[in-house]
Image (spheres, grey):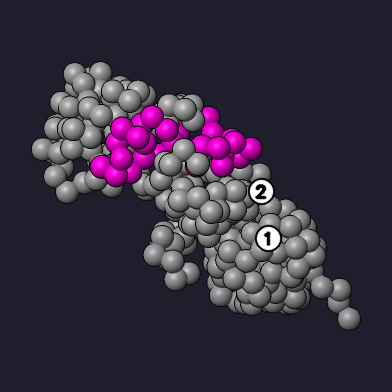
Amino acid sequence: MSDDLLNPDAVREIVRRALTEDLGPDGLDVTSVATIPADQADTAELIARADGVVAGLAVAAVVFDEASAGTVKVLIKEADGARVARGDVLATVAGPTRAILTAERTALNLLCRMSGVATHTRAWADELAGTKALVLDTRKTTPGLRILEKYAVRVGGGTNKRMGLYDVAMIKDNHKLAAGGIAPAFRLVREAFPDVPVQVEVTTVAEAEEAVEAGADFLLCDNMAPDLLRSVVAAVGDRAELEATGGLTLDRAREFAETGVDYLSVGALTHSSPILDIALDLRPRS
């Protein structure tokens, strides 16, 4: 896990919580303990059941490692970000059979989820190819899985917008109302946190111009139709980066990208991506 988003300690903590959820307070897989001798060992394969983009194989490997105290070994055969086809073997898993089956569902839950996000993101990235626009994710992530899902967005060809409320200030409608307007809100954030990037949500050309004049260099153009976006692009020029956001769909992605905005923000990448179907199959015993 060389990506800086996948901090090994944070990933292992996610894995431990997920295993505890599945195994309960006694750490017990009652079916495997009852049906499989403690000394039995096998080899299994992680196999794609559908075409897509794989992400999270190293995370799945951590699950097998954690569930087996290091006795299960995983050989990864595909790199994260690779396009895979139904029937492709993504990794082999070898070791105590009980441990393999104990880890199976947790490993697949994370792997299938991450691969689904990467696959969905790749569809958006492919649709935007040839334009200058990039697809961004949001904070609409599964609680506790943000670093995994945002990593999967990057694997799929997308861009991470911000990790949370702490690393980027985003002035939205409620902040503007509470502070008395765009300019006061921007000034207050800049005074309190001078080194934090500040982004401003706008809904009209006039708001876009006001935000830029206040000092904003990144604008969220919320729920704007393509014609209005083009007007904002013309008014703002290169004084700020522009993001189209709100209700975007893949079938109209290129129409919005061709308005000249820099980004399309898509919450659905993380809150609505279907999983990529991946299975674990034990190899037949000789």
Q: Image quarter for residue 38?
A: bottom right
Q: Is residue 194 magenta?
A: no
Structural crowding at the residue carrying mark 1, measured as other residues with C-alpha within 10 Å and reported as few (<14), some (14–19) or many (≥20): some
Farthest residue to the right: give it. Answer: 286
Mark number displayed over residue 275: 2
Of labels 1 and 2, the one closer to you? 2
Whole-angstrom CA distance, mark 1 to mark 2, is 16 Å
Structural crowding at the residue carrying mark 2, measured as other residues with C-alpha within 10 Å and reported as few (<14), some (14–19) or many (≥20): many
The residue indicated by pointer 1 is 104
Q: Residue at x 36, y 31 (%)?
A: 232
Mark 1 vs mark 2: which is more N-terminal?
1
Q: Residue at x 24, y 45 (%)?
A: 197
272 vs 6, left or right, is right
Farthest residue to the left: give it. Answer: 191
Dividing the image into 4 quarters, which one contains the C terminus? Answer: bottom right
Mark number displayed over residue 222: none
Q: Is residue 249 magenta?
A: yes
Q: What's the residue type where badge 2 is placed? A: Ile
Against 58, residue 28 (above or below) is above
Q: Residue at x 25, y 42 (%)?
A: 239
- What span is colored magenta in the figure? 230-257
Give 198 or 114, whichever is nearer the viewer.
Answer: 198
259 vs 211, left or right, is right
Q: Image quarter for residue 138?
A: top left
Measuring from the top left, give residue 159's x and y in whole percent: 44, 52
SS assignment at label 2: loop
Whether residue 18 is visible here, answered yes or no, is no
